[in-house]
Each structure stands twice: as structure tokens, then as C-alpha cells.
Amino acid sequence: MRTVAAVVLAWAVLSAPPARAEDSEPPLIELNVGDEKVLGGYRPLCDDLTVARFSEDGRGALKALKDGETICSVSVGSPLGRRAVYRVVVVTKVRPGQKKPAPVRR
């Protein structure tokens, strides 16, 4: 019985997917000021709430407020699940005939 448990444990450890590198870049979300993107998830957070924030109606919609860059995240699967992290870049909408503003760098 212990042999079976050891084999099952060894199989579970060896077949687990490799962990992501800690230094990898989070996925990029580019939005224009005023746009929304629904991400879903639980416990949404953003570092800079003047650039982007999540709606308070429970939809998990990320709303772009002003030019800038911030990091946002949501819990996936459950309120205690792993966090999905995103780099959010917000730029001003460009009207026809208007020059595109330079991206904001920090």
C-alpha cells in the first residue's frame, strides 16, 4: 500500500507543469481613456487607481481613466485562487487628423 502511495506521489510531482519564471513580464493590456475591458475574477486590485480601476458592480470590468501605466490583478477560480497579473497601459484616444501622443514611461 505504501508503494502505491509513493508511486502516485512521485507521478504527481513529476507530471506537474513547470512554474513560470518570476522575472517574466505580465500580459499587456492597452486601453484608450474611457475604454473598459472585462477581466472577471475575484478581488480585483490596481496599483494606481488614477490610471485604471475596476468597476464596483461585480462584473470585473477594468476602466481606463487617464494616460499612464499601472499593474492590475485578479484572483482566478476563487477568492483565494492564484492571482492573474496584468500590465495596463492607458493612452488618450486619437481623433482623425490628430497626432498620436508619445507613450507614458515611468
Image (cartoon, helix red, strand yellow):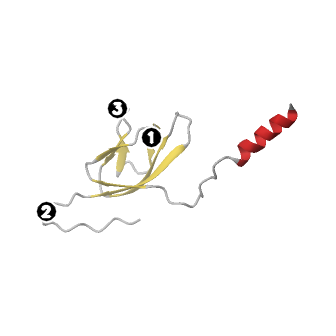
- Mark 3 falls on what kind of element? loop
The Cα–Cα distance between marks 1 and 3, rounded to whole angstroms, is 12 Å
Looking at marks 2 and 1 on the same chain, the residue that comes earlier in the sequence is marked by: 1
Residue 104, placed above or below residue 6: below
The Cα–Cα distance between marks 2 and 1, rounded to whole angstroms, is 34 Å
Q: Residues within 10 Å of mark 2 (few under 14, many from 20)?
A: few
The N terminus, quarter of image: top right
Give the camera-side residue of 57 and 37. Answer: 37
Q: Residue at x 63, y 49 (%)?
A: 17
Callout 3, which amino acid?
A: Asp
| Place of residue 8 in the rendered image (x, y in percent of width and height, measured from the top left) | 76, 38
The Cα–Cα distance between marks 2 and 3, rounded to whole angstroms, is 33 Å
Residue matched to label 1: 44
Give the camera-side residue of 29 and 6. Answer: 6
When asked about the image quadrant of residue 98, the answer is: bottom left
Looking at marks 2 and 3 on the same chain, the residue that comes earlier in the sequence is marked by: 3
Give the camera-side residue of 16 and 37. Answer: 16
Q: Residues within 10 Å of mark 3 (few under 14, many from 20)?
A: few
The C terminus, quarter of image: bottom left
Q: Residue at x 48, y 50 (%)?
A: 85
- Mark 1 falls on what kind of element? strand
When asked about the image quadrant of residue 59, the answer is: top left
Residue matched to label 2: 96
| Place of residue 9 in the rendered image (x, y in percent of width and height, measured from the top left) | 77, 40
Tell whether label 3 touches label 2 (CB within 8 Å): no
Looking at marks 1 and 3 on the same chain, the residue that comes earlier in the sequence is marked by: 1
| Place of residue 56 in the rendered image (x, y in percent of width and height, measured from the top left) | 36, 34
- Mark 2 falls on what kind of element? loop
Callout 2, which amino acid?
A: Pro
Q: Find residue 57 and name its label.
A: 3
